[in-house]
Amino acid sequence: MSEGEVALTWIGHASFLIQFTDLNVLVDPNFANWLFLLKRLRRAGLHLKDLPSAELVLLTHAHFDHFHKPTLRRLPSPASPSCPGVWRI
């Protein structure tokens, strides 16, 4: 990628990979085929083994389909999970 370009890859459901020239960000990574009793309708659009190392993982909220602990444990290093705070104006 050239300086100033951004690449956005939809992985599936709410999971995205956002790539800047010097930073990879994962949003709500979830690579599970099953979530409790719910089966994923389509497989993730990217295999976990093909995922580039992410410097930041953004977790939008703590629902099981967005905050998937088994996926977080399997992410390539160095990933730093971050959960945004709730702000009231």
Image (cartoon, grey):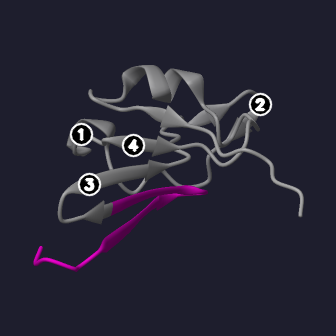
Q: Which residue is mark 1?
A: 53
Q: Which residue is mark 2?
A: 37
Q: Is residue 42 above or below residue 4?
A: above
Q: Is residue 22 above or below residue 32?
A: below
Please say whether residue 4 is one of the residues in the magenta stretch. yes
- The mark lying in front, picked from 3 and 1, is 3
Image spot of residue 88 (x, y percent): 89, 57
Q: Which residue is mark 3?
A: 23
Region rendered in magenta: 1-18
Give yes or no for contact between labels 3 and 2 (Cβ–Cβ under 8 Å). Answer: no
Give yes or no for contact between labels 3 and 1 (Cβ–Cβ under 8 Å). Answer: no
The quadrant the N terminus occupies is: bottom left
The quadrant the C terminus occupies is: bottom right
**Based on the displayed image, in which of its 4 quarters is residue 69 positioned?**
top right
In the image, what residue type sits under mark 2?
Leu
Query: Considering only order in the chain, which callout, 2 or 3, is on the residue closer to the N terminus?
Result: 3
Give the secondary structure at mark 4: strand
